[in-house]
Image (spheres, rainbow, N blue to C red):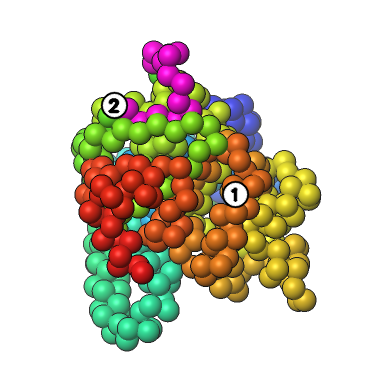
């Protein structure tokens, strides 16, 4: 975390110096007051009284001005540092491999981007404001009181070790508690995310009662952990107050005895009590700061856990297969979601075992099989979302592990299952931040057979979509997603169950557009319907991650029983 503060060390040092002098001005006020009461007022010299009154006024103005200026600098450092941390964390999340994303879980990543960065921001601001001022008030107050009355100062110092021990002990104990609390919040966010996304299903199946019970259980878990951590840290303030107030009582008793004995003066005792109050408040602020620091340490560890993840999807040195004329080749590819120690959030597809096929440029591969057969895994491996366990995947004879990630992904246009429509215009949903012309967008929408509803009255290319495309039908959403994949004229097009909501006529018309206008694009069409892939150059049939058939539609009808069963079940 220190690497993020390094660019601001100079600004922080200036802020600390300003804060230091502002705090010194605060410490001067009680001393000046004591001097006036004991030395100037008894002499009844109005001129000197007015003079020192002006000095007190100047000290007050300087203390206010310097502290406000330093606080503003501290806030700016905290804001800018947190902005950089949040940017780097978001950038790292975007480049995490799918395996790491599954391991961290999406709700946890969201929590780290929001709650954890907020805790770090609070800590950075508080440490700069109170982390400098409070210790100076404590140390400076003790030093000044030594000049006033060393005996009373020793009484004050005697209670300091107890307060420091309490603060350190409970702060150290609370850090793992706040870590457990954040993990519980991750689970809580995950459930909320799932329930809000599937609220229509919950209502349709009358499962609101069941979800309320799950919500209550997780809510109680969060509350219990938060209560446990807060109760632990709640002991700091009362204990600190107890020890310091006991010290104050002893100071009053000893001070009264010393004044009565004539070895001390009223002004000094008054100033001493004022300094004691300053020290008391400073110690309370330090104890509060430890609560924030404890949360921030737990949050910073969670943030750096993601930022420090080494880049997994890096180009590797792989042998060039120059004699291979295939554009895409899977060569005995085997993959398992549980091949390493990463535990995924959920296994969304089957593992793959010994998958081999090849495609020439412009050819179409249809992939079909039962749910969970491994169809989507083929596409994920081709785009290098996961690393193969054995075998190789090549594009133009080059192992994809040797291709830089950005250059590899730029070859693809893809539509995935349950893909995302953003809360933006139709045109921006198709453009998605790429340098595409208006003509490219309109052509892509026309090729995706979406023009008919995009240009209907009340809509248009600039009409705004609701979150997740809630104001579109299922088929309309799929056509916008297909237009997005086609807009950049990709070398490889992946359509993963992207026509399931289309009627047969629109599906057939879309296939015609692809064959006529994207003849040079190599296509992988993952489908549940035989009609969507029966015209493909090659068809791959998967069952439990294994190849059970490969060939044309006619060849598979003759040689693959599973394919025949799928076809017959859909007639």
- Determine which residue is flagged by label 2: 391
48 lies above or below 237: above
Along the horizontal axis of the image, is 115 left or right of 340? Answer: right
Q: Nearer the viewer, residue 509 or 295?
A: 509
Magenta span: 317-331
Which of the numbered marks, if any, corresponds to residue 514? 1
Q: Nearer the viewer, residue 50 or 564?
A: 564
Q: Is residue 144 visible?
A: no
Q: Residue at x 39, y 45 (%)?
A: 552
Q: Residue at x 44, y 60 (%)?
A: 531
In percent of width and height, residue 470 lies at 56, 72
In percent of width and height, residue 85 lies at 52, 39
Whether residue 361 is in magenta: the answer is: no
Q: Earlier in the sequence, mark 2 or mark 1?
A: 2
Q: Is residue 437 visible?
A: yes
18 lies above or below 398: below
Q: Residue at x 30, y 61 (%)?
A: 566
467 lies above or below 161: below
SS at circle 2: strand
SS at circle 1: helix
Along the horizontal axis of the image, is 125 left or right of 204? Answer: right
């Amino acid at each position: 975390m220190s690497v993020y503060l390094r660019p601001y060390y100079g600004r922080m040092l200036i802020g600390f110096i300003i804060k230091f002098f502002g705090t010194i001005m605060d410490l001067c006020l009680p001393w000046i007051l004591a001097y006036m009461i004991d030395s100037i007022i008894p002499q009844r010299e109005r001129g000197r009284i007015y003079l020192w009154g002006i000095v007190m006024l100047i000290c007050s103005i300087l203390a206010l001005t310097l502290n406000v200026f330093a606080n503003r600098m501290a806030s700016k450092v905290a804001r800018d540092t947190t902005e950089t941390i949040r940017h780097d964390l978001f950038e790292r999340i975007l480049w995490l491999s799918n395996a790491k994303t599954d391991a961290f879980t999406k709700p946890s990543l969201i929590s780290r981007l929001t709650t954890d960065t907020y805790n770090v921001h609070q800590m950075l601001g508080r440490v700069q404001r109170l982390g400098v001022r409070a210790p100076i008030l404590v140390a400076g107050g003790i030093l000044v009181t030594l000049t006033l009355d060393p005996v009373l100062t020793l009484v004050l110092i005697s209670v300091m070790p107890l307060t420091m021990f309490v603060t350190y002990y409970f702060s150290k104990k609370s850090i793992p508690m706040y870590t457990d609390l954040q993990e519980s919040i991750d689970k809580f966010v995950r459930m909320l995310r799932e329930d809000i996304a599937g609220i229509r299903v919950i209502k349709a199946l009358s499962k609101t009662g069941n979800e309320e019970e799950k919500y209550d259980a997780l809510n109680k878990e969060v509350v219990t952990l938060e209560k446990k951590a807060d109760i632990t840290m709640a002991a700091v303030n009362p204990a600190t107050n107890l020890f310091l107030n006991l010290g104050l009582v002893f100071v009053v008793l000893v001070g009264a005895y010393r004044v009565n004995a004539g070895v001390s003066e009223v002004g000094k005792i008054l100033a001493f009590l004022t300094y004691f109050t300053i020290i008391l408040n400073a110690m309370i602020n330090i104890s509060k700061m430890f609560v924030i620091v404890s949360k921030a340490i737990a949050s910073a560890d969670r943030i750096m856990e993601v930022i420090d993840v080494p880049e997994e999807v890096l180009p590797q040195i792989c042998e060039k297969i120059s004699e291979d004329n295939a554009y895409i080749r899977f060569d005995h590819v085997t993959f398992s979601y549980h091949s390493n120690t990463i535990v995924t959030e959920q296994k969304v597809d089957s593992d793959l075992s010994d998958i081999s096929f090849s495609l020439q440029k412009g050819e179409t591969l249809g992939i079909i099989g039962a749910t969970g057969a491994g169809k989507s895994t083929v596409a994920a491996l081709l785009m290098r979302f996961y690393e193969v366990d054995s075998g190789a995947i090549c594009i133009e004879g080059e192992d994809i592990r040797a291709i830089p990630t950005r250059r590899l992904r730029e070859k693809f246009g893809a539509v995935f299952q349950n893909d995302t429509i953003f809360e933006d215009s139709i045109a921006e949903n198709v453009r998605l931040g790429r340098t595409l012309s208006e003509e490219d967008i309109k052509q892509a929408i026309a090729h995706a057979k979406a023009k008919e509803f995009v240009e209907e009255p009340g809509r248009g290319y600039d009409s705004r979509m609701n979150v997740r495309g809630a104001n579109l039908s299922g088929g309309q959403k799929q056509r916008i997603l297909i237009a997005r994949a086609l807009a950049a004229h990709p070398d490889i097009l992946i359509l993963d169950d992207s026509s399931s909501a289309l009627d047969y006529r629109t599906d057939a018309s879309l296939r015609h557009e692809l064959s006529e206008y994207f003849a040079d694009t190599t296509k992988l069409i993952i489908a549940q319907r035989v009609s969507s892939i029966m015209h493909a150059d090659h068809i791959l049939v998967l069952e439990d991650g294994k190849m059970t058939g490969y060939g044309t539609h006619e060849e598979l009808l003759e040689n693959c029983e599973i394919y025949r069963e799928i076809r017959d079940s859909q007639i």
